[in-house]
Amino acid sequence: MEPSHVFAAQLLDTLPEPEIAEIQRRQSDMSVSLQKANASLSALNEFSAVKWTHLHPRFEAHTKLMKEMQSDLDHVFRKIRSIKAKLNLPNLDNDDEEGSGED
């Protein structure tokens, strides 16, 4: 006889029958509960996959648009700094900070 069978037989001999029945009932209840949770998670995964398929191209387009906007803004600010340097104007940011202390 295998050691696992010997152990199981000894365990069954030490536990009363009603306690074994209660353990089996609880195991069955947990199995049902876990199967329901698994089904819920599977449904959620399927739903999420469908939504991701629809939203992913939009996210990519918005990300591309944001990068283009950042590039455009960087270009604009470089031009502004260049024009300011050519006109030899003082830094407007420093004027704002100095002006706020005079109030």
Image (spheres, helix red, strand yellow):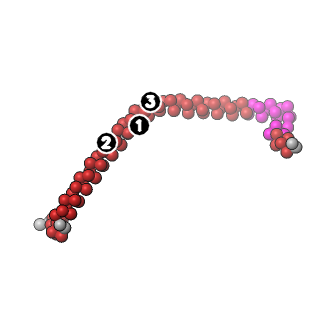
Residue 7 seen anywhere in this rendered image of the structure: no
Measured from the top left, where is residue 4 in percent x and y? Answer: 18, 65
Residue at image location 65% in from the left, 32% down from the top: 71
Residue that label 2 marks: 39
Q: Split into 4 quadrants, where in the image is the N terminus?
A: bottom left
Q: Is residue 55 magenta?
A: no
Residue that label 1 marks: 48
Residue at image location 85% in from the left, 37% down from the top: 90
Identify which amino acid the numbered label 2 is placed on.
Answer: Ala
Asked if 26 appears above or below 83 in the picture, the reply is below
Q: Nearer the viewer, residue 72 or 22?
A: 22
Residue projecting furthest to the right: 102
Q: Nearer the viewer, residue 92 or 98?
A: 98
Q: Are marks 2 and 1 in contact (CB under 8 Å)?
A: no
How far apart are labels 2 and 3 at the CA level?
23 Å
The stretch in magenta equals 78-95
